[in-house]
Amino acid sequence: MNKPTTLPELPPTYYRDNFICLINTVNKMYGDLLASNEKHWYDSFSALSEAAQCLYIRLLTRKGPYFRYDKIHYPEIDSVDAAFTELKQAKMVSLNPNNICYDTFCALYSKPELLQLFDFLASHKQAKKPDIVNQVINHQPDISLHTVRLVEVYHNEHLPVFFLLFFGNSHQDLSQFVLADLGLHQFEDYPIDPNYRLFQQRQDIDQWLQLSALNELYWQYKEAKDLTAIAAMAESLPERFDWPPLERKRQQLINHVGRDIERLGSNVPEKLDQARLLYQQSERPPSRERQVRILDKQGNISQALALAQLIQASPTNEEEADVADVLTHRLLNKLGNKQPPRKKPQFENERLCLAQHQASVELDVAAYFQQHGWHSYYLENTLLCGLFGLALWDIIFSAQQGAFLNPFQRSPKDMFSHKFYLSRRLQIDERLAALESGEWQDWLEIYRAKQGISNDWVNWDMLPEAIVHQAVSAIPTSALVAIFKRILFDPRNNRNGFPDLILFKDEQYCFAEVKGPGDTLQKNQIRWLKMFQQNQINAKVVYVEWV
């Protein structure tokens, strides 16, 4: 699909339209769950004039809450003074706030401006701004004497609530709207229905925000490489939540904190026990694997083996199953139960000796097969993921509890968890049966009707219609159904690892994983090749040596 060469020009107040879309959607979906002060803020904003709304949004979405009046200029707002007067009357801002600390005051001024404001800084002209700020703090001048007017914006604490309820997470913001406004993303027209909303009670909203704040604190400590501070966080982690989405989020944080405490255990052995106790509160991989490794490190081999065998018997996903096999084999050997060496998987392969011409080894191999009569495409994960997205398009975008929260989603909120299949089992099983029987063959109709619409599975730029037609004509539907079933078992991990190339000749097809000199198969690639082998899906590994 060709992208537009020039981006459309946005209307001057596009950000107001987007903001109003956001807060109106939240009010429609969650009005009954909003706190009284949040509802009052929504009503107060809605009653403002367009100019006052624009000014408030401009400031609310900037780093604040304090601003210099003389620095506020927006060409689309005719009278900033009148807008500020209205905002003050509505108690949305304060003009000339009197509670500013020295750090905040200095942050609003450049270094040259501070030097000009305070005579005692005359001897510090060569100092850096942090040193200048320290001097101001030490001297404690009367900053109220300075004539520049300051503004404080109120109620920015409501924004995280509205963002969470609109996006269903704590990391997206208004920039998503701009991508849609510019035409860079087009979105499916799915229902936004209060009956299918994600949050059902106010407690879940508050706990989500609290957990998000803890998560943000963790990543700050992580960036600072402060493992001691991370270890201290273990005491402030909340107890288990009854609501599954929130509990999954909690367990993800537990795994992060536990892993860093485990690293501390290399120098402080008792930290290993603390990490293991944390992992026991989580069912999310790799919590059980980490427990096995800690028990092994502590010399509790029998206990480690019992847990590894439990994982073997009931793995959460295929990656966990693979790890459990390796750990079980090693632990049995440690206990004196001598195990035969693990067999390396054997796949059909071809060895080529090529002269290097293209930018990558995959393109050189694709060119080689092209010269030998094959239609060869370097698509990696794009083809089979794309076919999956086309085959299940209407099911992916069907109304489900908590699936669609706003008009800017590329897939439902549960797309990359096992819940996706469980919540739509009947529809998906019917579609796969229709695929296998030949009753459903709407590939090209769906492709043409949906082309350009955002879908996490379909990369339109790399999936021309002609390749879709070639693929569904050559690859048996039984093979595609088997592939789709494996994707559905673990969508997050099984959407990766597909062979690099797809080859077509006459009515033949073959997947080819390309490995250059010294390169080896990755675990997720091995898992797909094993699955292809078990289902008689044509695939091979191409090993390349350079001439």
Image (cartoon, rainbow, N blue to C red):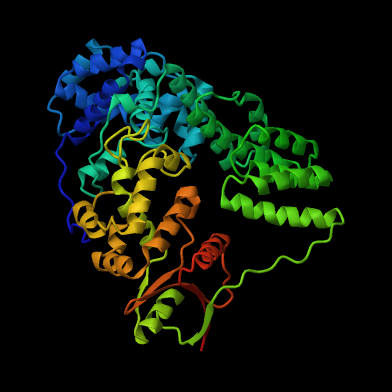
Residue 281 locus on image (x, y percent): 65, 32
Residue 433, relative to residue 473: is it above or below?
above
Q: Nearer the viewer, residue 241 or 159?
A: 241
- Residue at the farthest bottom position: 547
Residue furthest to the right in view is 336
Q: Is residue 137 left or right of residue 262?
A: left
- 396 and 73: which one is in front? 396
Q: Position of residue 72 (x, y in %)?
A: 24, 29
Q: Is residue 196 above or below residue 126?
A: above
Q: Can you say whether 373 is above or below 337 in the image?
A: below
28 or 425: nearer the eye? Answer: 425
Q: Residue 259 location in percent, x, y?
A: 65, 42
Q: Is residue 177 found left or right of 112 in the rendered image?
A: left
Left or right of residue 292, residue 145 in this image: left
Residue 187: % across, % down: 25, 44
**Where's the N terminus, which quadrant?**
bottom left
Residue drawn at (37%, 13%) of the image: 35
Q: Is residue 418 visible in the rendered structure shown here? A: yes
Label total for image: 0
Q: Note whether residue 34 is visible.
A: no
Which residue is farthest front? 437
At x 72%, y 47%, the residue is: 309
> Residue at the location (37% across, 68% down)?
475
Quarter of the view holding residue 388: bottom left
* Position of 127 relative to 59 (above/below): below
Which residue lies at the image location 69% right of the left edge and 38% below the top edge?
A: 261
